[in-house]
Image (cartoon, helix red, strand yellow):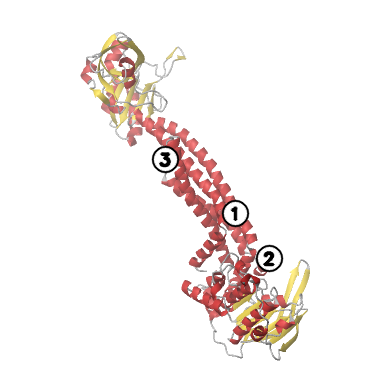
Amino acid sequence: MHRRCKEVEAVAGEDIDMNKAIISVKALVKIYKMGDVEVHALRGVNTDIMKDDFVAIMGKSGSGKSTFMNIIGCLDVPTRGQYLLDGVDVSSLTKDQLANLRNHKIGFVFQSFNLLSRTSALENVELPLMYNKKITSREMRERSLNALEAVGLADRAHHFPNQLSGGEQQRVAIARSLVNNPVVILADEPTGNLDTRTSLEVMGIFQKLNQQGITIVIVTHEADIAAYTKRNISFRDGRIIKAIEVDKPRNAAEELALMPVIVEEDDL
Amino acid sequence: MKMKNLLIATVRSLSKNKMRTFLTMLGIIIGVASVIAMLAIGQGSKQSIQAQISTLGTNVLMIWPQASSTGGVRMEAGSSQKMTLEDVTAISDRCPAVAYVTPQVRTSGQLVNGNMNWRTSVFGVYPNYFEIRNLRLSSGSLFSMNDDRSATKVCVIGQTVVTNLFGVNADPIGSFIRINKIPFKIIGITEKKGQNAFGQDQDDMVIAPFSTVQKRMMAITHIQSMLASAKTESLIPTASQEITEVLKAKRNLGPSEDPDFTIRTQTDIANTATATSGILTILLATIASISLLVGGIGIMNIMLVSVTERTREIGIRMSVGARGRDVLLQFLFEALLISLLGGFIGVTLGVLVSQLIANILSWPVTITIQSILMSFIFSSAIGIFFGWYPARKAASLNPIDALRYE
């Protein structure tokens, strides 16, 4: 009974006014204990991420950006501090409640795509909806096909990941992150395993989704990828050292159109 | 997670690795098939023994006098001469649970017909012996109590005796043979009964009226044993009790004193014989169960490997909202489905193998519903038991570590 109440609470609040923060963290501290040694991954982070924002989180490895990502992705809980996701205080939730929150409010995109192998693109995209009790099989199929269409892969629905290029695999992963209508998409180095051109494609999709009103947070260490976002937050040693608005975000779709077309030999 | 989605996820992940799924299943298949086949063989031999025991007759009780002793030297069982026809009358008069009772004497006789001769047992009994022993005549007629009273020299003979004295397919009804030089008229031939549970040929005997054998052939006044039948199978213990009481009373023996006779019932004999085949069944089933157990350990092994191999998948599932319970159930269902499917194929295979054994080796084989149900329950229990630990391991993974796992 208790769980059901929480579930309802988590789903509520679909319409958020423009000024409301989707993600709001205050004095976030994360300490890992490696044996006797304490590692301070986050040393008091304060930030708000508003609806419709497109944020790049930057920093060297060990700067705490991944830990930050894990916490705002509800994969991990902070040691101290407050984290409100879409108005819900996450800090005190149980494992199951966190899973439920991930299912309803968050979409993940990973550097290494993380698609299920030997599973069709469509079935991969369906995955988050499998864990949503309220969705019927037909709805699941429809929404998954729509998500694939949104990333331009409707014709590849029945391909397996090993039959898709890296860029296509990442687009399937984006479709998967979209399918549950999350309040925010979190992407961890989404272009890290991709070449320049496919990176542009992926950033183009993110920009398009952002224009449709989806809040996106990406982690990257590439400055030129961050240039396609609206706001850059830099981490160092577990703290935010710089948060800047990007003056004039670059437009991935336009740049892609200007790039010389490379004809893959396979396609001949 | 909805039950339907859980099943879909389970089937999808099993069908992704068809070969591995099949090989894992193989342990259960072989285990279940051998349990089914072994139990079928065990049950079959048990039933065929029971069928043979039933050739003794219906609800039979055998009453033997105790061994006699002369000056402290004890003789063989049944050598006492204290049993008389009065005992037979007393039992038939005063034991309501007893349907029939007949005295029995047995001697061996040299049978002669022309130039052919044969040695066999000659039984002297009342005509109701045929009721007790479920004997039927294939031709001719039975002697009567009048024949017994007048000690008529008539006899009924078994098929083996016919073959040995008259040749195959002969019809000796009405012919005379000499038994120990006494001429007997053959009035009937018994139906073929075959071997009994102990390998004796039940068609190799001569049956004649009691008085004829007792007085004319053996020249004795006592009877060697009695054969009785209870009215129903459930009345066998009651009949045995009644006979004991009547005979003890006739001998002025108190209830606590040891009787000078022994009663053996058909149930006793059947129990002894089936106990042996029961032990055999248990032995076979145990060996088969061990292979089922090994199959279960195979499932656990593969599931454990699979948890490690699929760590990343578990991480992905958790990142999109799978709770620990969802992962646990999926792995448990996979193990359960493997063992149930294996159980199903195993049962089919077991039935086929049993039929093959029945046809090729012509062993008696009986497949019982119980053994099929038991195999199913056992194999699903194995699935849950051996699937539990790997499933728990999968469910307890931390999503961050699982996603990072290489």
Quadrant into which the C terminus of chain A falls? bottom right
Percent position of residue B262, x then y: 39, 24
Local secondary structure at mark 1: helix
Percent position of residue B85, x then y: 29, 19
Q: Earlier in the sequence, mark 2 or mark 3?
A: 3
**Residue, x 28% and y 17% (percent of image)?**
B208
Q: Amino acid at mark 2?
A: Tyr
Q: Which mark is residue B339?
A: none
In 3D space, how far apart are the residues under numbered discs 2 and 3 (Cα atoms)? 53 Å
Is residue A93 among the parts visible in the rendering?
no
Q: Amino acid at mark 3?
A: Thr
Q: Which residue carries the number 2 mark?
A: B405
Residue that sits furthest to the top in the current view: B181
Q: Earlier in the sequence, mark 3 or mark 1?
A: 1
Q: Amino acid at mark 1?
A: Met
- Chain identity of mark 1: B
